[in-house]
Amino acid sequence: MNDKGANRAVSGLEAAVARVGDRWALLIVDALLEGPRRWKDLVEALPGVAPNVLSARLRHLEQDGLIVSEPYSVRPVRREYRVSAEGKELAGALSLLASWGARGRGEGAAVARHASCGAALEPRWYCPTCDEWAEPAEEAVTWL
């Protein structure tokens, strides 16, 4: 790595990608958002994932504090996995990514719904300082 790269600030997106790693990590978190799962349950929920990839991603996510594993059997050691409080913060981003991906394929996207009335929920940008709502397309929204 050159000196320029060593001093470069890491963007928020780069930091997020470094934490979640790849598609399998995102799919694991998504599967665990439904509730705790054991190894066999994760293999069934993620068709196509190689066992070594699943093991590596689970270790990485646990080291980063996004999931928690607890043993439920000592011999052999078997674990149950669940999303940590910090991992639950990914739920909104995963929902937006899923909707975006479904729209790109011309599919109707599954959306979050309001529990009281069943209406589709829409993500919006809100400024708590000004007490105003803004749309990302507006000039009032700037990305830093």
Image (spheres, rainbow, N blue to C red):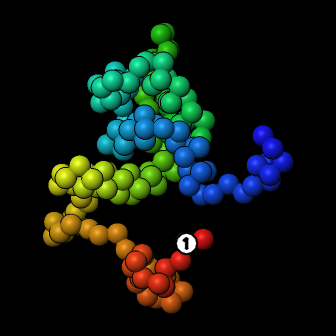
Residue at the far top: name it.
75
Q: Residue at x 57, y 44 (%)?
A: 19
The answer to whether one can see residue 32 in this image is: no
Amino acid on which disc 1 is placed: Trp
**Placement of 48 over or under 117, stated as above or below:** above
Quadrant for residue 43, please give it.
Answer: top left
Quadrant for residue 99, please give it.
Answer: bottom left
Within 10 Å of the Cα at label 1, are there few (<14), some (14-19), or many (20+) other Cα atoms? few
Q: Where's residue 131, x and y in %?
A: 46, 88
* Quarter that holds the N terminus: top right
Q: Where's residue 21, x and y in %?
A: 53, 39
**Placement of 59 over or under 16, stated as above or below:** above
The residue where tag 1 is placed is 143
Q: Nearer the viewer, residue 65 or 24?
A: 24
Q: Where's residue 47, x and y in %?
A: 30, 26
Q: Nearer the viewer, residue 89 or 49?
A: 49
**Placement of 20 over or under 138, stated as above or below:** above
The answer to whether one can see residue 53 in this image is: yes
Q: Residue at x 46, y 55 (%)?
A: 89
Q: Residue at x 24, y 55 (%)?
A: 103
Instruction: Report whether 46 appears left or right of 50.
Output: left
Q: Where's residue 108, x and y in %?
A: 17, 55
